[in-house]
Image (cartoon, rainbow, N blue to C red):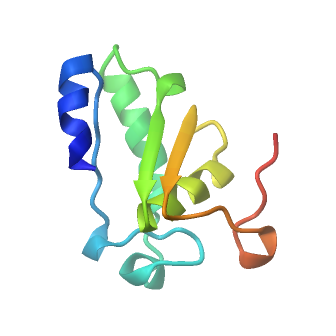
Amino acid sequence: MESFLPYAETHNFLLILPLGIQNSFNAGTCCGYAHQNQIHDVDFLVHLQKQLSSEFAFIESEFAYAVGHSNGAFLITYAMQQHPHLFRAIAPIGGYATTKDEGFGMLEN
């Protein structure tokens, strides 16, 4: 995701690159240490967005986008299913939306 840094600098957008605990994110039904220890990564994303929006006037939550790769893709998909208005759009790479039967719940309009 560091490849986005030059674009953030050139086009004046805020780029946040969270690193999961032990390189993992809890995406509901997976992955690694964060899932095994029930780390609240979705709550972290919600808190981070609220905190940054309140601290910096130029940050508007309705213009937040997320890109995730692998476990990060699972996380942003899971986050959108839990909080459909958290991001304006997401781009999961190498992860997918699961069905309600797999524990994620279905996205509704």
Relative to 36, is 8 on the left or the right? left
Whether 38 is drawn above or below 4: the answer is below
- Residue displayed at 78% across by 58% down: 106
Whether 7 is drawn above or below 109: the answer is above
Q: Is residue 21 visible?
A: yes
Residue in front for this viewpoint, 10 or 61: 10
- Residue displayed at 58% across by 71% down: 28
Relative to 13, is 6 on the left or the right? left
Residue 50 percent coordinates (x, y): 44, 34
Q: In the rendered view of the protein, which quadrant contains the C terminus? A: top right
Whether 83 is drawn above or below 52: the answer is below
Residue 102 percent coordinates (x, y): 73, 77
Whether 41 is drawn above or below 109: the answer is below
Residue 92 percent coordinates (x, y): 51, 53
- Residue displayed at 49% across by 64% down: 94
Residue 13 percent coordinates (x, y): 30, 23
- Residue displayed at 46% across by 64% down: 40
